[in-house]
Image (cartoon, rainbow, N blue to C red):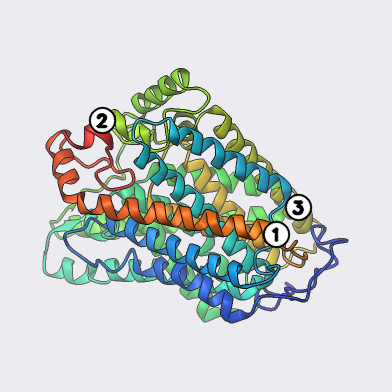
Amino acid sequence: MGRSLTHANPCHPRASDPMNAGNPVSDARPAPVAVVALLLPLAVFLPLSINVHVSPELYWYDQQRIGQVAVLVAMAALVATRLARSGPSVTFGRPAPPVLLGGFLFLALGGLSAIHAAQVPDAFLEWSRFALIGLLAWTVSSCARSFPGPVSLALLASLALGCLWFAGARLGPYAAILALHLPLSATDFLDGFDNPRFFGQLQTMTLPLLMVPLILPRVSMRWRVAASAGLVGWWMLAWLSGTRGTFYALLATAVAAALVFGPRGRAYAMASAGFAAAGALGYLFFFVSLPGWRGMSMEGATFERSAFHLSSREALWWLAIEYIVRHPLLGVGPMHFAAAGSAIGAHPHSLPLQIAAEWGLPAASLVLVGIATAVVKRASSLRRLLLDGTGDADAQLDMLLLIAITAALIQGLVDGVLVVPYTETVLAMLVGLAWGRALRGQAPVPLGTSVRTCVVLGLCVCASVLTAGTWTQAQQLAERISVQEARPGLLLPRFWSAGWIGPAARQ
């Protein structure tokens, strides 16, 4: 199958890769210790934040938000320090002009929207978080561009460790629960997420990526069997969570992969279908038939929900459309859908509607055009590699990354992938990996002194706003939760698990 991602030479392009043809290659790369320092907060966050509950007084969602803010602020500090102390940076190459211009315009429009918002601190809290999520993707891409193999393996292994730890800790006590006839609840198997949909968002991105060991040429049969068993267990939990967006997104991307990527795409689609079927059989046996035989039942299982019921999303979508009609240019303000005090949700459960309603139609157009352009260009490039016979394990890994990202974006049409902290962080990391690996072998354009100065100042501002806003609101979190629980009777998350802002959060 050719060279694996662990043996790819990051400094020299493959002759068969059209993305690298004719591009100069720089031998100047950042020191590995700098890359480790930059990515260490992220690598620690991925497995710990869904498996270690620091305080029983905190919802998992709030703990993960605090962890996400810590990662973003730490990364901003590390990047700013490196840019301030170095000469023309080879770690952080200047993004391509369309990416740079699009990102600047998006943040500029968001800043204007925040200035005109009713709750300016909340608006800038959201704005600064989006800016630093972009920084995370840029940082990962810069590191992956210089060290595509090690960075890919380290970050994907950290994510896989979190998933396997999660599955083992939840499925491990199953036999004891069954033998002792203890209460069997679906929520116990999804503990680590306050809502099954949040867990489903993670599975949408990780189910394709957990197939990586199956495409690497130097992986032993023992590890392939272990990876297959892990995939079946992960699919069992997917069926248990009943997250319909996950199933629709993975089905759509499997069909698209089969149509676009030729034999490799069809092999992925067939393998996915096989693991999904095995997981469904495991779910029916272990969580339906076996407990029934023991005279037990699974509480809280959501698999039986209607496949086409919108769960009141249509009301949220109409509210978002009303905001768009009333505020087409700048939106109602970042995070300000949560100011409506809706008893259904604090966000529209739709990525395009969320950006359009809160940031305005111009900002939403930038996002949608950018996403569509990036996905189509990357899919076209990978298609050529995979169809002409030069697509080795690296190209297959890139295909799985693109499938995972695209599946998350499809799910984002009906869910809050730009709201849930763990989902946002993982998605930004995957985008950064795919971005950096697409540029591997190309010499980065160094950042000039004036650009580095502007970036450092911008990072200081964003990190300060995010830190101050998070700290201030964390002191009032218990009060916000009690207010929201007293009204609709459930938590409607946004920045915090109690997601309302403005007067709705205080009355």
User: Looking at the picture, which amino acid does disc 1 mark?
Assistant: Ala
User: Looking at the picture, which amino acid does disc 3 mark?
Assistant: Ser
Residue at figure coordinates x 60%, y 72% from the top left: 85
Residue extending farthest to the right is 22
- Crowd band around label 1 with a 10 angstrom C-alpha radius: few (<14), some (14–19), many (20+): many
Which quarter of the picture shows residue 334? top left
Vertical side of 314 occupied by 274: above or below: below
Residue wearing tag 1: 438
Give the secondary structure at mark 3.
Answer: helix
Closer to the camera, 333 or 281?
Answer: 333
Residue wearing tag 3: 381
- Crowd band around label 2 with a 10 angstrom C-alpha radius: few (<14), some (14–19), many (20+): many
Where residue 357 appears, as percent x and y from the top left, is: 45, 29
Residue wearing tag 2: 341
- Which one is in front in this view, the residue at disc 1 or the one at disc 3? 1
- Crowd band around label 3 with a 10 angstrom C-alpha radius: few (<14), some (14–19), many (20+): some
Left or right position of 419 against 299: right
Task: Evaluate whether residue 171 shows in this view.
Answer: yes
